[in-house]
Image (cartoon, grey):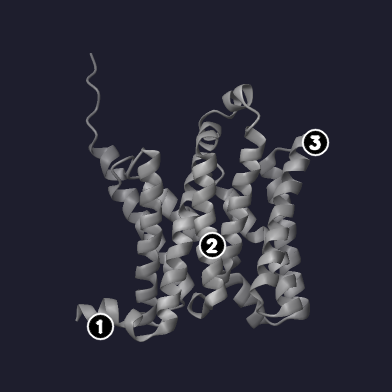
Amino acid sequence: MLYDLLIEPFAEFDFMRRALVGSLALSIGAAPVGVFLMLRRMSLTGDAMAHAILPGAAIGYLLAGLSLPAMSLGGLVAGLAVALGAGAVARSTALKEDATLAAFYLVSLALGVVIVSARGSNVDLLHVLFGSVLALDDGTLLLLAGVASGTLLIFAVIARPLVLECVDPSFLRSVSRAGAPVHFAFMALVVMNLVAGFHALGTLLAVGIMMLPAAAARLWTDDLTRLIVLAAAIGAGSSVAGLLVSYHASLPSGPAIILMAGCAYAVSIVFGRSGGLIRRVARPRHLEA
């Protein structure tokens, strides 16, 4: 019974094993990025950047079809252009970065939909928006594994200044010039993981495996190292559960993975040891004179 429920889908079908490997690699790379986005209070930036890569990926798709290098390069260029453009406008005008980023990503999203609608079909648009985790080929798996490995390596290099910037950006600017390079390196990591993620989950859902595990993990621990490990574990567990649910219930795999991550987030809201509802309600009140 347990074999049929948990093991058989991955043992019998090659596309399920590929989806499992790809989604696990995506979880390991994207979840730590989501943790730092959350700590920097930039959670919505991931969503904005996920939309921002759409026109580049769409142009790559229309020029070369389902070409991994063309779509990845197009998405990477579009994402970095939006990140740099929003940052440049914020630093040279009275607008804050959240306002400029919102403006840039909305224009990018509209442009991407127009490009796909003008040259492609509804099927093309759905593929770009929602991905195809059950159709990962060797090249895409290598891309996901490479991005995950590169993300962990870069985090190991910039971890200290990145944490300082999350806690007190003014202090980092006063003692070091590493603030701007670390910020742009981190934004590049966000774009890289979203570009890798849209091949599996699409531009709309890739940010889900980045932010939902991070938000769920935050409700269980305050320790940064545990937070990163737990976020990656929740992302991996959501990927496995989502693939199994999609297999047995004949549901779309990408949305099923994100729904499982949403369930983990809902459970964490109620039972989380570090700020969950039950913990807050059960906390004894301070004695008053």
Circle 3 packing at 10 Å, graded few (<14), some (14-19), many (20+), is: few
Q: Nearer the viewer, mark 1 or mark 3?
A: 1
Question: In x, y percent, where is residue 183?
Answer: 62, 40
> Please, which residue is most extreme toward the top here?
289
Q: Is residue 258 above or below residue 222?
A: below
Image quadrant in which you'd find residue 68? bottom right
Q: Secondary structure at mark 2?
A: helix
Q: Amino acid at mark 1?
A: Asp
Q: Is residue 93 visible?
A: no
The residue tagged 2 is: 146
Q: Nearer the viewer, mark 3 or mark 2?
A: 2
Q: Secondary structure at mark 3?
A: helix
The residue tagged 3 is: 92
The residue tagged 1 is: 4
Q: Is residue 286 above or below residue 55?
A: above
Quadrant in which the C terminus is drawn? top left
